[in-house]
Image (cartoon, rainbow, N blue to C red):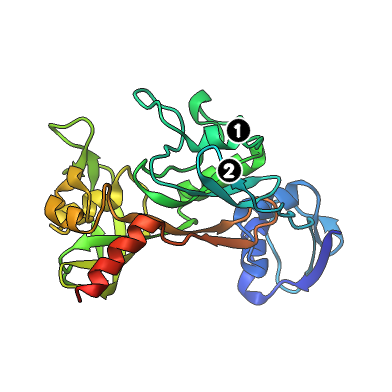
Amino acid sequence: MSDSRTLPVPDGLDGMRVDAGLSKLLGLSRTVAAALAEAGDVLVDGRPAGKSDRLLAGTWLEVTLPEPARPVEVKAIEVEGMVILHQDDDVVVVDKPVGVAAHPSPGWSGPTVIGGLAAAGVRVSTSGAAERQGVVHRLDVGTTGVMAVAKSEHGYTVLKRAFKERTVEKRYHALVQGHPDPSVGTIDAPIDRHPRHDYRWAVVAGGKPSITHYETIEAFRAASLMDVKLETGRTHQIRVHFSALRHPCVGDLTYGSDPVLAKRLGLNRQWLHARSLGFHHPADGRWVEFTSEYPPDLAAALAVLEADY
């Protein structure tokens, strides 16, 4: 059933656009608020209001919200070893394992998230380039964790805009060599392709603005477990930024990790995990968040460090 709400326009929203005011009042994304107005589901003193109309303090807003999207039963995707964390009409969220790419690409013949979803009978949005339809963000082949794919065209449009406008909250856990100082900080350094190695990226003057926030969760003798929040989403951003600090992700041989430490911890890839992903749902703007537990190889590496503490 739809949800109808009637509420007065407070003085603080006087003169504000309808879509912006609804976003503040009800916690909706501005995109969803605008869509409600365009559909005729927003009335001001009983009259339909356009998304760009201005609010007047003391008038009454009547908003009809759509029925919340209904998730389907969680199930495993056996083909690629992935697990669906959530699925509804607009979006599917998976727990991506190591060794799986986000989508097909030149030079990659291994498993992909898109291929796994297709094998499981999950239809995704047709928006985007042919090889990456429905993909709104990516994780490296060697990075595990939460990844979202759009199922509907509306879902694709809303999520792509959310990533562009940086309203998505992406949190990673990274095990880095040594002990970053300060233990809590922000790395603000532009990233672009490496000047000499095509397959690598680097901090480069004139590159794209790139911002990484971090906080130390736990410090071990040889490494530190970090909570990382991305403000931007450049290719290899976390790996490049911590490498630039001379604290590369443990196991990341591409960006300068110590191979001896990686071997001692039993790692064959970088210790980097997409821990959680939060966003305003395309259907009704409610905030949703999904988390992923550490896979066995990352958990085992931490156990070795803890025993050596």
Residue 235 place in picture, x, y as percent: 32, 42
220 lies left or right of 45: left
Question: The disc labelled 1 sits on which kind of residue?
Answer: Ala
Residue 6, numbered circle: none
Q: Residue at x 14, y 50 (%)?
A: 259
Image check: 93 left or right of 19? left
**Amino acid type, mark 2:** Ile
Quarter of the image with the N terminus is bottom right
Identify the secondary structure beneath mark 1: helix
Residue at (24% x, 44% y) in the render:
191
Q: Tag 2 or tag 1, which sits nearer the N-term?
A: 2
Question: Front-most of 256 and 170?
Answer: 256
Q: Quadrant of the C terminus?
A: bottom left
Query: Is residue 106 in view?
Result: yes
Percent position (x, y) of residue 187?
24, 60
Residue where numbered disc 2 is placed: 77
Instruction: Judge by depth and name the residue closer to the eye, 306 or 291.
Output: 306
* Residue that carries the numbered disc 1 in the rendered image: 119
Q: Position of residue 43 (x, y in %)?
A: 81, 59
Q: Are marks 1 and 2 in contact (CB under 8 Å)?
A: yes
Tell me the distance, in whole angstroms, between the alpha carbons under discs 1 and 2: 8 Å
